[in-house]
Amino acid sequence: MRLVSYNIQYGKGKDGRMDLARITSDLAGYHADVIALQEVEAGWQRSHDTHQPRAIAAALPGYHWAYLPGFDLHGAKMRRQFGNMLLARQPIWQTRLVPLPKIPVANEFNMDLAAVEGLLNTDAGPIRLVNLQLSSVSAEERLLQIEALLSPVQSGPAWSGPAQVRGLVDWSNGETPPPASDSAILLGDFNAEPNDAEYRRVTAAGYVDAWRHLGHAEAAGITYPAHENWPRALRIDYAFITANLARKLMGAGVDQAASGSDHDPLIIDFDMSLLPPAA
């Protein structure tokens, strides 16, 4: 199973040019089973009022997808949205929007963010995949967001308990609830480096940095290259996995030749296969 995480910066490339097709062309070339995208938007003038989730889905046929924006406002032509998108070659068993805490600030821009959790079925069992972008404002805010994501409240199925309510309404729709799963992958743009408190909090919770577990060099894992407005290259995009998945890791890479965003795509390969949801 190949997993790709990519903060696409709404299609604005390293050359400052808006070109969503450049993003989808690269994504098609990775032959991924699961794609986690951050900074996907709809209804913004800067991206020509494009509904980017629909455009991405149209350019990548063969994927099931979910887009659950954390930022959602009335717009002149369509709702103005900003958030994360999850695509998979098999149906996504369950999705959940996880709103992330925000600290009001007066001296710089801040906005509502949310993670998208998708439950995927594999031959290694069901896995919760949490596609996220954490705040760029402060470590304090990012730590609050990490605590929200680590909450056990986020780990259960979409519904539980008897499907019959007072014998009158059947909420099961003739189906069984999706399973809970202790296997999880937290991936995306953490806006934090390996020496930061945010990284330490995630690993203290038992998650494993897939890149480091595979023994790869830090420099090869740079996902945010230096540029005119930011002089230092950073490794801030990660795939953190529960320890039981570490033995399934096969390889990882960063496409540092990609030019479609200010971030580079992170690619993780697992020795397991994506399956449709169990009947």
Image (cartoon, rainbow, N blue to C red):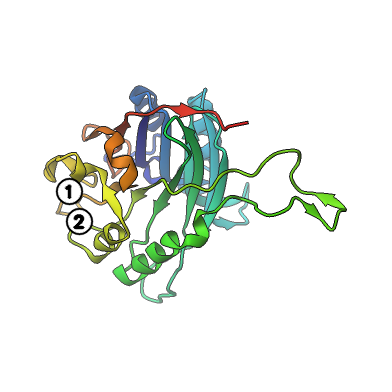
- Residue at numbered disc 2: 194
Of residues 155 and 14, the one drawn nearer to the viewer in this rendering: 155
Quarter occupied by residue 165:
bottom right
Q: CA distance from mark 1 to mark 2?
A: 17 Å
Q: Tell me which numbered mark, 1 or 2, is placed earlier along the sequence.
A: 2
Question: For the point 57% across and 56% down, which residue is it?
Answer: 72
Question: For the point 34% across and 67% down, which residue is it?
Answer: 143
- Image quarter hosting the C terminus: top right
Question: For the point 57% across and 38% down, which residue is it?
Answer: 93
Q: Are marks 1 and 2 in contact (CB under 8 Å)?
A: no
- Residue at numbered disc 1: 226
Q: Amino acid at mark 2?
A: Pro
Q: Secondary structure at mark 2?
A: loop
* Residue 170, placed above or below residue 247: below
x and y, in percent, of residue 110 in the image: 42, 66
| Label 2 packing within 10 angstroms: few (<14), some (14-19), many (20+) | some
Q: Secondary structure at mark 1?
A: loop
| Label 1 packing within 10 angstroms: few (<14), some (14-19), many (20+) | some
Residue 17 as seen in the image, left or right of residue 75? left
Question: For the point 42% across and 73% down, which residue is it?
Answer: 103
Q: Amino acid at mark 1?
A: Ala
- Image quarter hosting the N terminus: top left
x and y, in percent, of residue 221 in the image: 19, 42
Question: Is residue 30 shown to the viewer in this render?
Answer: yes
* Residue 272, placed above or below residue 165: above
Residue 172 as seen in the image, left or right of residue 72? right
